[in-house]
Amino acid sequence: ARPRGGGPRAPQFAAAGAAAAACGLVAQQSTARCDVPAGSGARIRKPSPLQSEPPEIVGGLQMQGHFLEVPLDHKDPSKGTIPVFAREIVSAKKKDAKLPYLFYLQGGPGFPSGRVNGPSGWLARAVQDHRVILLDQRGTGRSAPITGQTLEGLGDQQVVDLLTNLRADNIVEDCEAFRRALGAKKIRTLGQSYGGFITLSYLSRYPDSLEACFVTGGLAPVGQHIDDVYRATWKRVQERSRRYYELFPGDREKVRAVVKYLSENNVQLPSGSILTVDRFLATGIGFGKSGGMEDFHWTLESAFVANGELDYRFLVAMDRDHAWDTNPIYWLMHESIYAEGSSQPTSWAAHRMQQEIPALDWKKALANGDDIVFSGEMVFPWMGKTFLELKPMDGVAERLAAKSDWGPLYDTEKLRNCKVPVLAAAYYEDMYVEWRYSEQVAKLLGPKCKVWLTNEYQHNGLRANGYNILDLLLKMYHGEAAVPS
């Protein structure tokens, strides 16, 4: 049982109607037809009424929040419902125009869509000719969020049963519920990273609901075993670590000094969590982003104060650079995104593959004078021992790692020679999503999948230069760009 107080209860899954009333929401019954693709085998349901907040104008954009009450498990509605939130954004100048819907599928898992102050980046390009839907994927943001607080009073198996319903299959069903409620026969999607994984699940289930799909750094490794996925990503992490030391050779000894200090001292972060060597090295997740190496370099330059202790400012930065306390789904469910109808458990695959590679052993590297290799976009069992808010979830994580009855996420036959245009930006040296596997998926999707492959950007290309990247993908869709040449 979980140590926090209170009796067993559902984690803030109050009825959407009650929550809506508290927020001053207005029910809007959609008049849309229920456009379920013929022959899909899906149950035809009437669209649920949207619970909509009053629209606001922010930075020249009209923004309006919508809630939908959806089944916790779309395959078994008897398990109850949860509220799912999405924010509709349109140029204030075009608020009455008939524009196609573009559903943004956030990376993760476990992170909500961003909150915006006006048109910038990819959104500035998108609102020129779309109504944008920023979905808070179930369990994040305002969609029945999963946190240490909302899980109070639940037993480990209760939490496992809950989290099992937060994968891409149910997220796709949530998108379909919104599509129907908004009265859209077809939508476009923009999937960043994990959002691209969701896109492929969408194409596997409801291709007739999709007009076009744009993917950035997210052509999922469909059909690849999780062990092979992490073997490939560890090689990428090794290469990025090598490049970091090549870029900042003076940091070799600074990294070694921090590792040595942490191996000899018990260091508590301002949050109350523990900074171990492994947690310090996990900061390498930023090496897969544009500017990530530089950011870490500047953090490292003031790691110590004059008396040889770690600088408080450095410790604050270490707290800031790891968001797993506030977004526990990432730690709990990350490896499950690669559990594709498998009868085998994930069993902490990244950690197991790490043990296969001697160069990743920081203790040996420290003793032998070798370069210490960081880690990347991976989750580990030790996180439940060192992150304060994750400690009560440690038993949940172990049960999820041992779970062997994950359902399928993709239908390779439906994906094969897909009739929906898929326009993808793929990054040749992506540290998070292995390009070799993405290339195989692109071939599976067939001639309507067009890929712009580049090494100009890292995995966060959409954040680094989103306007131009989305603009190019839209031009590829409209036949206005000769990509691929």
Image (cartoon, grey):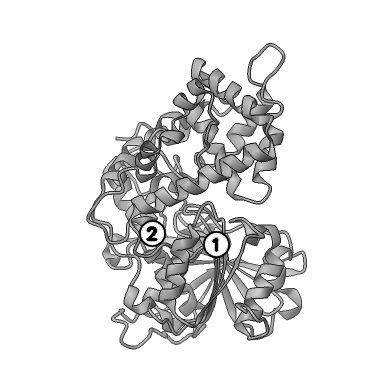
User: Does 403 appear above or below 480?
Assistant: above
Callout 2 secondary element: loop
Q: Nearer the viewer, residue 235 or 176?
A: 235
Q: Where is residue 380 in the image (x, y as percent from the top left)?
A: 41, 39
Choose mark 2 or mark 1, whichever is in front.
1
User: Does 81 appear above or below 476?
Assistant: above
Q: Which of 409 and 145 is in front in this view?
A: 409
Residue of label 1: 217
Q: How crowded is mark 2: few (under 14 residues within 10 Å), some or many (20 or more)?
A: many
Gap between marks 2 and 1 measured at Cα: 19 Å
Using residue 338 as the reference point, say whether residue 263 is left or right of it: right
Q: Can residue 316 be seen in this view?
A: yes
Callout 1 secondary element: loop
Residue of label 2: 167
Q: Residue at x 27, y 66 (%)?
A: 76
Amino acid type indicated by mark 2:
Arg
Q: Can residue 90 be seen in this view?
A: no
Outermost residue to the top: 307
Asked where in the image residue 222 lies, by quadrant, the reply is bottom left
Using residue 287 as the reference point, say whether residue 393 is left or right of it: left
Q: Residue at x 35, y 31 (%)?
A: 3
Using residue 283 as the reference point, say whether residue 417 is left or right of it: left
